[in-house]
Image (cartoon, rainbow, N blue to C red):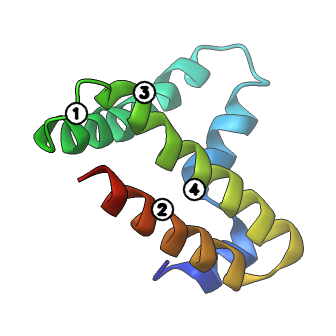
Amino acid sequence: MEQRDLTARHGCPTGSLASELDERGDGLDRAVAGVMARLLDWAEGQFAAMGRDDARELAVAPLGAYQGAALLTNTFRDPGLVEAEGRHLERWIDTLA
């Protein structure tokens, strides 16, 4: 949420890069997938630390929600979209504790 203005101008750098590299077919798509996998693994670890048996499944939600919110924020040039989704995710995570 702190990067909302930057996200409104440029989107998510990692998500944008992943999308662009996917079109190349030279293996760089798999390299950026490794970066996204580390983000997913980190989120999974956070949910596992909360004692959740479904940590991997839960980890997909915030990563996907952020990527979607970043795309919409950039498309509409509206920093409030990613900020609102961030607050929504915070409330959702609080319900899981």
Residue ID for mark 2: 89
Q: Amino acid at mark 3?
A: Glu
**At x 58% / y 14%, what residue is drawn?**
27
* Inter-mark Cα distance, 1 to 2: 17 Å
Residue ID for mark 3: 57
**At x 62% / y 46%, what residue is drawn?**
15
Q: Amino acid at mark 1?
A: Arg
Query: In front of the other: label 2 or label 4?
Result: 2
Mark 3 element type: helix
Residue 39's disc is none
Mark 2 and mark 4 lie on one chain; the one further toward the N terminus is 4
Indicate the position of residue 51 as horizontal and vertical percent values: 13, 36
Mark 1 element type: loop
Query: In front of the other: label 4 or label 3?
Result: 3
Q: Amino acid at mark 2?
A: Leu
Q: Are marks 2 and 4 in contact (CB under 8 Å)?
A: yes
Would you place residue 67 above or below residue 1 in this image? above
**At x 60% / y 23%, what residue is drawn?**
29
Residue ID for mark 1: 52
**At x 46% / y 83%, what residue is drawn?**
2
Left or right of residue 62: residue 38: left
Residue ID for mark 4: 66
